[in-house]
Image (spheres, rainbow, N blue to C red):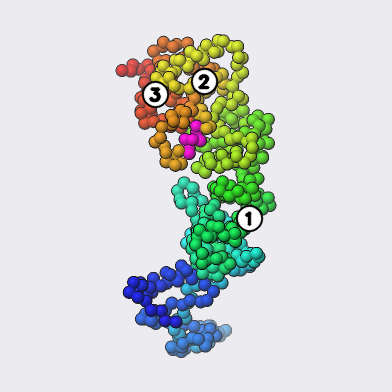
Amino acid sequence: IVLYLNEDSTEFSNEYRAREVIEKYCAFMPVSIFLENETAEPQYDTIEKDELTEKDTVVETVIEPAKTEEKEKEDGTKETVEIEPSREKYKILRRPVALNDTNPLWNKHPNECTEEQYKDFYRKVFRDYKEPLFWIHLNMDYPFNLKGILYFPKINMEYESIEGTIKLYNNQVFIADNIKEVIPEFLMLLKGVIDCPDLPLNVSRSALQNDGFVKKISDYITKKVADKLSGMCKTDRETYEKYWDDIAPFIKFGYIKDEKFADKMGDYILYKNLEGKYLTLQDCLDENKEKHENTIFYVTDEKEQSQYINLFKEEGIDAVIMPAAIDNPFISHVEQKKEGVKFLRIDTDLNASFKEEVKEDDEEFKKSSEELTEEFKKALNNDKLDIKVEKMKNAGIASMITVSEETRRMQDMMKMYNMGGMDMGMFGGMGETLVLNANHPLVKYVLENKEGEHTAAICEQLYDLASLSHGTLSPERMTKFVSRSNEIMMIMAGQKTE
């Protein structure tokens, strides 16, 4: 076959451009493909006699002399001994090497493939030298023909793109990457190859979306992935837990995006608690049933929420760690599917277990609460601040900040969609509450010294400390906090401040 190129296509007469196209689209074509540059200098190889074939072009016969060695005899004299006879070798034109692999790994039965072969194939196809976590080998003949391998790479949600590459082939000829009509959306996080000769390719993508056959292929792939993951959880829980932190974003994304996948995987999604133990949703509910039925407390940042974590541990209350961006929409989806189940971040409100009981008719406490609220609002110059006064069991904590779950989720959603500059007032305020511990000496001091010289500074300091324990301060507040802290230390050291 002679291919004639017009002027617009002369780039394909370039050896390197032709090689690039062949390696992309025909890397696994079932017929061997060779590329030869007729103007290039010929290259040669030297082979053994028994390696010679009828197809080889012999350029020269090379006689390799025998190898000898000098050995000492019993009488002390030396003689030369032949240790390897002379050999006849042949210099031949270098044999052409096919650019493609005519029998790719996905065509083989899974039992014929070794772990190293799977890894080598992954490195070759995706040019990724980080080893995949594990893989699924797809092999189906009925009701349609489909073969392939899906790899679970280690996903770094913070620093890398989370989109993988699913390469689609038809009879070993590359068609395209990531065809969403064929591959379920959540599987786009994976890397892999799928070869489906039965896939209709002479139709538009909009027709693919409505094609029942294509939908069956998508459903089959989803089922196989769910079967692999749930099977691993049931039969090899230790390995499943080892991989969990890496595959969790993928599974949670699938849970949100694909109803059938969610139904199959719901009982096999794990939650890591404060002790680093992995639990299913039912495990979490059962372990905490006595203290908070149908409620799961969670942590998004172990450093920022350390004060609350310590309170939970003191009272023997458990929580799960959910730091990823996808966890916010994920828990909302779980709440929709699991009626009655509620997720609350541990700093949403002060749990009843942390407080001393206060009688409803305790007028003295009510009066103290009102006076403290008024004093703090005046010192902080913030009439809208929501303040609660509680008698906490832990007298070592003076103040805390809590944020309502609804407000916090709204804030997270706005951050996700880059809406951080919007006025949160339109959503009913920040939902932030300053909790004061009536049992702490500094709070008592404020109550007893409302007109004191340092009372206002103590109120501001307690508020800023609570805010720091909950997150961060604005640059302006941080500047004031540092300056005020220096003033307090000067007073403690007996030095006058200006």
Label 3 residue SS: helix
The residue mark sitting in front, 2 or 1, is: 1
Q: CA distance from mark 2 to mark 1?
A: 51 Å
* Residue 485 image label: 3
**Residue bounds of the magenta highlight:** 407-413
Q: In this image, 195 relative to 42: left or right?
A: right
Task: Find residue 6 and report its image quarter.
Answer: bottom left
Label 1 to label 3: alpha-carbon separation: 60 Å
Q: Is residue 306 above or below residue 142?
A: above
Instruction: Give the residue drawn at x 49%, y 35%.
Output: 410
* Element under disc 2: strand
Residue 309 in the image: x percent, y percent?
55, 32
CB atoms of marks 2 and 3 within 8 Å: no
User: Circle 2 sits on which residue?
Assistant: 388
Amino acid type assigned to the residue bearing label 2 in the image? Lys
Mark 1, residue position: 223
The answer to whether 216 is drawn above or below residue 102 in the figure is above
If the image is split into quadrants, where does the N terminus sit? bottom left
Nearer-the-camera pick, 296 or 94: 296
Instruction: Tell me which corner region of the image, top left, top right, bottom left or bottom right, holds residue 40.
Output: bottom left
